[in-house]
Amino acid sequence: MNRFAAACAVGAAVLTVAACSSSTTQSAGPSSSATSTSAAGAAMAGGAHTVTLAPMPTGTATLTWNAANETVTAALNMSGFTPGGAHAMHIHPGTCADQTKPPSVPFPDITADSSGDVHQTVTSTTKSPGGIPASSYLNIHLAPSATMGAPGSLGFTPIACADIPAGTAHGPVTLKLTAPPDHGRTPAGTATWSYDAATHKLTVDVRATGLPANTSHAVHFHDGSCVKQGAVAYGLPDLKTDGSGGGSEHATITVSGPPPAHGWYVNLHFGPMAKILAGGNPTMEFAPVLCGDVVG
């Protein structure tokens, strides 16, 4: 069992009852790494602290056309994926805001490392005569090619996208990938917390917009950072969205000490706590959707 699974498995037992309510008090035992992290560095105690939650995954892909064999090469430098997760990637006609056409240039699956980073170069599996297609976009899906399914299925869900600018047929062109809009809204959020040193209670408010309507999402404090993911330190109840894709929750948890000035991040996952693990390993629904580093 990896470090993510071990920490999540403990958290799952603690959160089974708490996750049924958007406002609760719970005692969530930290992972061993969380205990040491809390004691390290300058701790943030007293007052309220807020972090902006940014869409995940994020990063760049540089596309280059090879005239000799008419293929497209994509060099990725990205973070914020499910650690160890594999994802289908294609060039599609259209735009990130209008994803209605099938792919025209497929690539081999990309695979994240144990920290959720992708530093990988892949070459298209079909030819692209004339260069990098114009009026197209690069799309990364939630699942790998073998299990992504058809449009509208869970695995097909786009998680990172970038429009390809005109006039870049031969490349190289570097694209900034981010979460595509859902019904015109891009995911965004904040997490605000305060710590009571007398009671060791951490009170947390999480707010999010631009998520799929009427869905639930696991929320955790993790060791590490958004670009170098680590084990779960403490879990919160699932955040539930309304019909417009917005949601908020207020929770109080018992912790061993105040959040550190550095070394924690807040992670909101694609799926609820009950679905982000299978057999002790992260599922595709573990995928980070919103993330923010705790910085004092």
Image: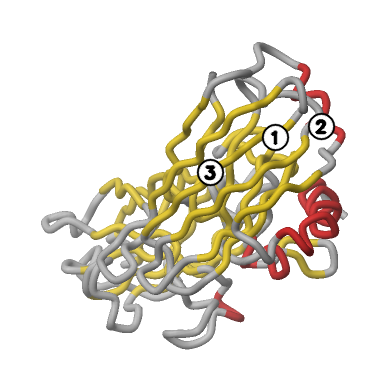
- What amino acid is labelled 3 in the image? Asp
On screen, 44 above or below 155? Answer: above
- Residue drawn at (43%, 69%) of the image: 242
On screen, 208 above or below 102? Answer: above
Q: Nearer the viewer, residue 295 or 208?
A: 208
296 vs 3, left or right, is: left
Mark 1 touching mark 2, by CB under 8 A? yes
| Residue 15, percent from left and from top | 77, 57
- What amino acid is labelled 2 in the image? Ser
178 vs 193, left or right, is: left
Residue ID for mark 3: 205
- Residue drawn at (35%, 78%) of the image: 103
Residue sticking out furthest to the top: 42
168 vs 254, left or right, is: left
| Residue 156, percent from left and from top | 48, 77
Mark 3 touching mark 2, by CB under 8 A? no
Mark 3 and mark 2 lie on one chain; the one further toward the N terminus is 2
- Which label sits in the foreground, 3 or 2? 3
| Residue 185, percent from left and from top | 29, 62
On screen, 233 above or below 19? Answer: above
Q: Which of 275 and 190 is in front in this view?
A: 190
- What amino acid is labelled 1 in the image? Asp
Secondary element at image label 3: strand
Mark 1 → mark 2, Cα distance in angstroms: 7 Å
Query: Which mark, by number, is residue 181?
Result: none
Mark 3 and mark 1 lie on one chain; the one further toward the N terminus is 3
- Residue drawn at (31%, 67%) of the image: 70
- Label 2 neighbour load within 10 Å: few <14, some 14-19, many 20+: some
